[in-house]
Amino acid sequence: MSTLGVLGLGSYSTLFYIKTLNAMYNKKYGGFSTCPFKLLNVDFDAINKLLPNTSNALDTIVKTHLNTLDALKVDNILVPNITLHETIDRLQIKTNVIHAIQETISKIKGNNHVNVTIFGTLYTMQSNYLTSQFTAQSINIVKASDADMQLIDNLRIAVYNGDANPKQLNIFNDLLIKYTKNGIVVLACTELSVINTSNSKLVYDMARIQIQAAIKSI
């Protein structure tokens, strides 16, 4: 059995990942089974202060944490933060890091989808990093309107702060319907994964896809 390592990055996202890991593992193996993994919980504040931009300082912190997790003799590493993958891409890590973006692209291409709209933080939706990963694989990015991107980011912040209201949640579901009319929607933010209740095959939840890959690796 391969050993999974999880980098703990803030209680909100980490607890979601742990809960989902256990739920998916139990669904697969039944009984009272829970997902076996090694958790390295770090001070997310030091990392969060440097996000979303990349920097040498961020590289150093992240590489130190991943090397510490590697020293625990894990075979695969799960990082519960999509934005950090831009930093991870530049680092030389011995242990395999389960890449949320690559796993999602593989799933999209396997289902022959062409048009994708990304829902995430305002930075994620506007930056070149994520879109370039998709376009390099001949996947077309259909950007949400500026107004819709702002609505999505406002909701993401509200979810993080624990005060998202029913009106915002309804708007989110309406936006999913709107942007899946001519393609698929990729959720690239943990806060959006938390509130995602869609059963549509046209909604790709990056966090859950990443977690599914982690379960398969064990």
Image (spheres, helix red, strand yellow):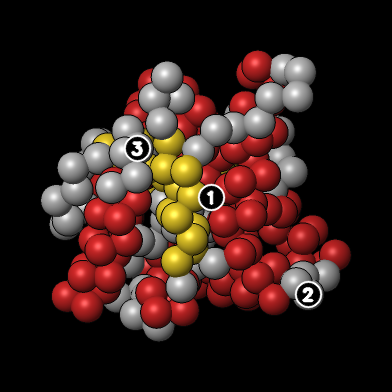
- The N terminus: image quadrant: top left
Residue 154, how many percent across, how many down? Answer: 63, 75
Residue that carries the numbered disc 2 in the rendered image: 163
**Res. 17 visible in picture:** yes
Residue that carries the numbered disc 1 in the rendered image: 187
**Which of the marked residues, 2 or 3, is nearer the chain's N terminus?**
3
User: Looking at the image, is 138 positioned above or below residue 177?
Assistant: above
Pointer 3 and pointer 1: residues touching (CB < 8 Å)?
Answer: no
**Which of the marked residues, 3 or 1, is nearer the chain's N terminus?**
3
| Quadrant housing residue 202 | top right
- The C terminus: image quadrant: top left
**Which of the marked residues, 2 or 1, is nearer the chain's N terminus?**
2
**Front-most of residues 130 and 52:** 52
Residue that carries the numbered disc 3 in the rendered image: 74
Residue beneath the point at 38% across and 62% down = 83
**Front-most of residues 89 and 139:** 89
**Front-most of residues 112 and 2:** 2
User: Looking at the image, is 100 positioned above or below residue 80?
Assistant: above
Mark sitting on residue 196: none
Helix, strand, or loop for circle 1?
A: strand
- Alpha-carbon distance for marks 2 and 1? 20 Å
